[in-house]
């Protein structure tokens, strides 16, 4: 019982942290595209890869959260 409450709080904290990084990298991608960077630039690809990683992590964590509830 206590472990599941701790795990729930931990999952919610991870979701919050990944949400922060999503907003950070989304702003970076938006600034790169608005500055006229080429779509195939390395910086844009790197920021997009990190953005996708954090989005996928949130999806996985939300599935875990549904399992506990």
Image (cartoon, grey):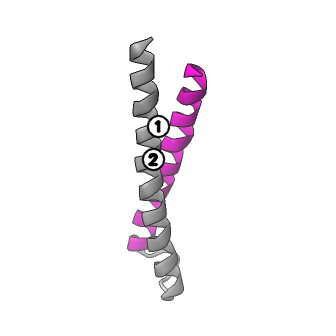
Give the quarter of the image for residue 28: bottom left
Q: Nearer the viewer, residue 67 or 46?
A: 67
Q: Is residue 6 above or below residue 3?
A: below
In screen coordinates, is 1 left or right of 60? left
Region of the chain picked out in magenta, as a range? 43-69
In the rendered image, residue 4, in percent from the top left (x then y), is placed at: 45, 17
Q: Nearer the viewer, residue 40 or 44?
A: 44
Main secondary-structure element of the magenta-colored stretch: helix
Location of mark 2 (residue): 16
- Tag 1, which secondary structure? helix
Give the quarter of the image for residue 50: bottom left
In the rendered image, residue 64, in percent from the top left (x then y), is placed at: 53, 27
Q: Is residue 26 above or below residue 34?
A: above
In the rendered image, residue 40, in percent from the top left (x then y), is placed at: 49, 74
Residue count near mark 1 (Cα–Cα under 10 Å), binned few <14, some 14–19, many ≥20: some
In the rendered image, residue 69, in percent from the top left (x then y), is placed at: 59, 22
Q: How many marks?
A: 2
Name the residue rendered at 43%, 76% in the picture: 41
Q: Are marks 2 and 1 in contact (CB under 8 Å)?
A: yes
Residue count near mark 2 (Cα–Cα under 10 Å), binned few <14, some 14–19, many ≥20: few
Q: Which mark is residue 12?
A: 1
């Amino acid at each position: 019982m206590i472990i599941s409450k701790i795990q729930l709080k931990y999952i919610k904290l991870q979701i919050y942290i990944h949400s922060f990084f999503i907003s950070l990298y989304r702003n970076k991608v938006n600034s790169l595209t608005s500055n006229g960077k080429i779509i195939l630039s390395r910086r844009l690809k790197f920021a997009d890869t990190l953005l996708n990683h954090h989005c996928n992590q949130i999806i996985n964590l939300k599935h875990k959260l549904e399992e506990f509830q």
